[in-house]
Amino acid sequence: MNKTVSRTPGRTWRIVFLIALLAFLYLPILILAVYSFTTSTQIGAIRGFSLQNYVTLFTMPDLRNMILGTIVLAFGSALIATVLGTLGAIGSFYSKSRFSGAMNAINQIPVVNADVVTGFSLCILLVVVLHISKDTYFPLVAGHVTLCAPFVYLSVMPRIKQMDPSIYEAALDLGATPFRALTKIVIPQIVPGILSGFALAITLSLDDYFIATYTKPATFDTISTYVVNATKGAQTTIKTALWALSTVIFLIVVLVVLGMNIRAMRAEKAVKREHI
C-alpha cells in the first residue's frame, strides 16, 4: 500500500511535466492558427471570423510564387541529396572498416556544423572562388544538397546495417551484375530508410534560412527568408497571410505524420498476422 501511495505523486508530476511540455511546443502554433481565421492585425485581441488571410495567401502573386519556388527547391534538392546520401551509405557499408570509419566521421561534420558557417563557406567557395553566379541557382541548390545529404546518410545507414550483407554477395555468385544486385537486392530492403531520409531532407530544406540567405539569387525568396524579411517592415496583409501559411504547413506536417504512423501500424499488424 505504501509503495502505491509513494508512486502516485511521481506519476502525477510526470503527467504535469508532459502536459507543460506539449503546451510549450504547440500552444503558440495553435494561437497563431486561431488568429489566422480572424480579422485581427496583431496578436492580442481576437476580432471577427474571416478567411481573408487564406484568400490572400493563395491569390497574391508574390506569396504564391514564393511558396511554389520553395516547394520546387525542397523537392529537387531533397531528391539529389537522397541519391547522394543513399549511395554514400551503401558505399561506406561495403567498404573496408578504415574507409567506412573515415566516411562516418566526415559525414558528422556538416551535421554538427552550424548552418551559418556552411552557408557562408559555400558562398565564398562557389561565388567568390569559382565565380559561379548566384543567378544560376546552382549555389542555392548545392547548399541545400550539402545540408540534407548527411542526414539522408544517417537515415539509410541503420537500415543497411540491419540487412544481411551476404545476400548481396550471394546474388553476385549467382550471376547478377553489381548494378542488378544493388537495384534488386539491396535497395528494396532499405526503402524505408530512403523514404525517411527523403522526408527529412524536404523538411530541412523548407526550414533552412542561413544557407538560403547566403546563396540565393536576389530576386528569389524561400519561405524562411520571406518570413524574416516580412517581419521587418512588410504590409500588414502580408504578415497576417503568413499566419495562415504557418497553419497550413503545420496541418500538412500533422497529416503526414499521422499517415506514416497509421501505415506503420498496419504493416506491423500484417507482419503479426503472417507469423500467426
Image (cartoon, rainbow, N blue to C red):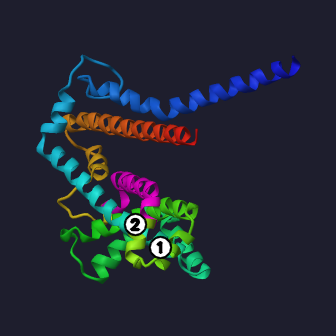
Can you give x and y, in whole percent of width and height, for residue 19 in the image? 57, 27
Quarter where residue 124 is shown: bottom left
The answer to whether residue 116 is visible is no
Q: Quadrant of the C terminus?
A: top right
User: Which residue is depicted at the point 49% across and 59% down?
Assistant: 155
> Residue reaching furthest front?
174
Q: Nearer the viewer, residue 170 or 121?
A: 170
Assess whether residue 161 is covered by the magenta stretch. Answer: no
SS assignment at label 1: helix
Query: In the image, what residue type sits under mark 2?
Result: Lys
Query: How many C-alpha atoms fall within 10 Å of the one at disc 2: few (<14), some, or many (≥20)?
Result: some
Find residue 192 and report its horizontal and vertical position in percent.
45, 54
Q: Quadrant of residue 188?
A: bottom left
Instruction: Tell me which secondary structure the magenta stretch mostly adopts.
Output: helix
Residue 61 vertical placement versus 180 (above, below): above
Span of residues in magenta: 186-212
> Which label number is shown at residue 184?
2
Residue 4: image location, x then y, percent: 82, 20
Q: Which residue is mark 1?
A: 171
Assess whether residue 190 is covered by the magenta stretch.
yes
Contact between labelled residues 1 and 2, with CB atoms less than 8 Å apart:
yes
In-image side of 69 versus 228 (left or right): left
Residue for point 33% across, 24% down:
34
- CA separation, marks 2 and 1? 9 Å
Quarter containing the N terminus: top right
All told, the count of numbered labels is 2
Specify the amino acid type for callout 1: Ala
- Specify whether residue 256 is in view: yes
